[in-house]
Amino acid sequence: MKIGLLFAMPSEFSALPGAAGLTALETVSGVDFYQIAPDILVCAGGVGKVNAAMAAEILCLRYGVELIINAGVAGCFTDLPAASLVVASALLQHDVDTTAVGDPIGLVSTVNRVIFPTWQPEHCAELLSRCGIHAVTGLVATSDSFITRGERADWIGRTFHPLLTEMEACAIAQVCLRNDVKFVALKSVSDHLYSDNQVEEYASFEQALAAAGEAVLPLAKAIQAEF
């Protein structure tokens, strides 16, 4: 199985063991693409939904990947400890709103769905466990905003009840759905939305970066071993 590892920020990519010694295969639309293992490609596509979708589409169409794993950090709605790993059980985009024309909140047109699936999340958590890495599963909400404590966070929690919020995963899930490519999202808790020190937490998220970086390649190889 050919797999693409898709990060957002260079710091997330750099936390991947072995990343520092890689030489780019090529640069496409401003994104550098690397090969880190046989049939495993990796890139840092940029922050936000458009950047993530562009990188995912390149992985699908130019490189022919059969599965994409989006790894990185995310904010947490609960007290799950920092650097805890979460395999997304499903995803949604909480900033999509066409309710004015009668649609449900979060409905993404064209594909006409609110909830986006991921590939065998419980099994992926089990594969990580076999590698000695603990992960839980949970719903992940995506938007083009860094969510902090306040009315918006309260509304997201009441409306969708996600475990995490971040800025890329559901956009990648949307691309994968339309390309019939499997998708996995592996996120590490970097900050807590209801903490008085959220911004300070996020500014010192090296432990969360390391947790995601150290888990994603073992997961990819474990998935490959089954195909």
Image (tube, rainbow, N blue to C red):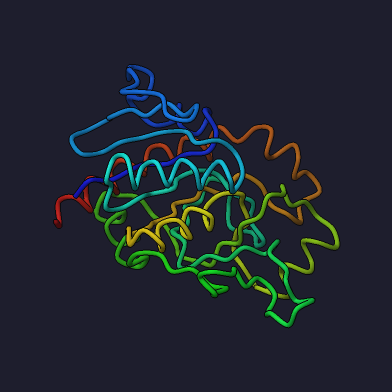
Question: Within the image, what quadrant is residue 114 found in?
Answer: bottom right
Q: Residue furthest right?
A: 151
Q: Is residue 27 above or below residue 168?
A: above
Q: Residue furthest bottom?
A: 102
The residue closer to the viewer here, 116 or 203, is 116
Q: Position of residue 49 (x, y in %)?
A: 59, 48
The residue closer to the viewer here, 139 or 34, is 34
At horizontal 41% and vertical 62% (from top left) the residue drawn is 178
Is 57 displayed left or right of 188 in the figure?
left
Is 28 displayed left or right of 52 in the figure?
left
Q: Position of residue 98 (x, y in %)?
A: 72, 71
Is 167 displayed left or right of 196 in the figure?
left
**What number of labels is visible?**
0
Question: Within the image, what quadrant is residue 107 found in?
Answer: bottom right
Q: Position of residue 180 (x, y in %)?
A: 33, 62
Q: Is residue 113 above or below residue 143?
A: below
At horizontal 68% and vertical 80% (from top left) the residue drawn is 104
The residue closer to the viewer here, 9 or 110, is 110
* Viewport quadrant of the C terminus: bottom left
Q: Position of residue 154 (x, y in %)?
A: 79, 66
At horizontal 40% and vertical 65% (from top left) the residue drawn is 118
Is 73 displayed left or right of 132 in the figure?
right
